[in-house]
Amino acid sequence: MSADRAALEHALERGEREGGSVEFKERLTRHLHLTEGRLESLAAQLRHRVLSGEGEATYVVGVTDDGGIAGISPDEFSESMDVLSFLAEEAGAHIEEVQTWGVGEHDERGIVGVATIREGAVLEDDEHIVVGTAGHVDHGKSTLVGSLVTGETDDGEGGTRSFLDVQPHEVERGLSADLSYAVYGFDDDGPVRMDNPHRKSDRARVVEEADRLVSFVDTVGHEPWLRTTIRGLVGQKIDYGLLTVAADDGPTKTTREHLGILLATELPTVVALTKADLVGDTRLAEVEREVERLLRDVGKTPLRIERHGVDAAVEEIDETVVPILSTSAVSETGMDTLDELLERLPKTAGAEDGDFAMYVDRSYSVTGVGAVASGTVKSGTVEAGDELLLGPMADGTFREVEARSIEMHYHRVDEARAGRIVGIALKGVAQSEVQRGMVLLPREADPTPVREFEAEVMVLNHPTNIGDGYEPVVHLETVSEAAAFFPEGGQLLPGDNGKTRVRFKFRPYLVEEGQRFVFREGSSKGVGTVTDVSPAE
């Protein structure tokens, strides 16, 4: 809820008048306002308001026709927003932003909201790719993304990185400590960038204006937070990996860790050599050769974009061919080439058929709305108003909830399909009960959570052998949980492929056959695939 009532006061002062862009509604309901005839009339009214405002209209909900503050309950407000979103879609528009305020006495407290509606619809899924970034701390990863999404050159001190750091201590220290998200896009005239990524409406504008969208999941480069990086790369439905290697530093141990995770999860990857402005041609060529050797050592084929061109990179990139290019966020070296590559790369994480499923990556609370679960839709489609299951809870049960509303980059949408990074407001559960690793499913689903499963694993690195009771952290979808391994035959050696039983240490999760995971403990790491799921005992 916004503490600043200026937007509300301004809308009330402008008033609802003929030929204006402001509309007052006390409440909108599905059974009354979406009926045949009424729907068409209200959609036409909304279209008129949008045209009167030269592409933008303001709907004030929770007020009477004369602008008197009435206030409605959270459930009534959520339903009103769902109906308004449907009407906007019918009129070829969308809800860009919603601000809410609490009104009335504590016992009868209601909500008044101002919805900004903009002309234009949401992108189709095949015009939206998701890129997961990785790279050693201070190798220019967040700076590169910040320059891409804003078009601004960096000041040489990582200034554009501030567009992605969201916690005060991250800004102060210049280190990202959690996943960050950014977006930009393309239309017929080229890149559509953000003027101010911290402004919600600016992100929504990009979603509205772009014909093709590129979302970044910016991970963490500092080694102590490798767990968070793995979560970002494994737990999101990512199309491509973008690995940064600083030209003045070259590949590091963390570079190798991140590359191993990207390639082990079979993610098509691009390597960007950053900070090219800090070194000469000889040093840049030396680092290129180091990266090429690193790729060949793990069975991959490097492809230099400067030599072979963007056409070749777009056609050849896959799990075995890794394009490389040199960049600088300061001098803009290679930035146009990277733009062109991201504009042309095809979507790889195609929409999965089947029922809706979304693993929760994070949760938060919005006043007047309640608990919000954020994550990447794994399969199927979810719509505002859908009845869902959330869980498993610690005891293995699932909670019945309702999807109140859905947002993507602060852009309210009626539905979300596989591959979209969204926030879903949930009715029927407190924010404190929504935890990372849980999954949202249709109400009619019959999920069976498990404490243990069988898997095929490959040990990528371990100082000795892995025996019964070995306890790494398993990263599967958004699950990050300690688990005990019980290998077939009693042990696994570095470089081994083998079978093992995996048992979560603390609680059950929803695990399915065929899911891939990463496990790590200290300097040890490996990858695996779930082969058999057994019900919890």
Image: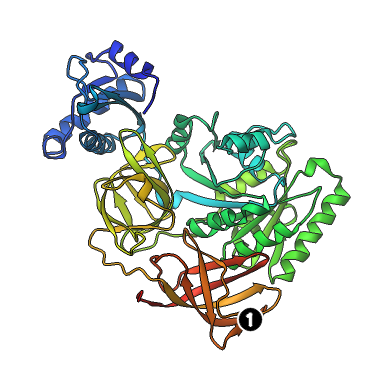
Decide: is 517 above or below 160: below
Q: Name the one closer to the observer, 362 or 516.
A: 362
| Percent position of residue 94, x then y | 33, 35
The outermost residue toward the top is 13
Residue 310 visible in rendering = no
* 454 sits left or right of 358 in the view: right
Q: Which quadrant of the figure has residue 441?
A: bottom left
Q: Name the one closer to the observer, 334 or 287.
A: 287
Residue under label 1: 496
Q: Which quadrant of the figure has residue 170?
A: top right
Q: Name the one closer to the observer, 440 or 168.
A: 168
* 242 sits left or right of 78 in the view: right
* 465 sits left or right of 78 in the view: right
| Percent position of residue 204, x then y | 44, 34
The outermost residue toward the bottom is 489
The colour mode here is rainbow
| Percent position of residue 342, x then y | 58, 48
Residue at 31 percent across and 52 percent down: it is 382
Decide: is 158 above or below 526: above
Residue 125 visible in rendering = yes
| Percent position of residue 528, x then y | 54, 73
Residue at 67 percent across and 78 percent down: it is 494
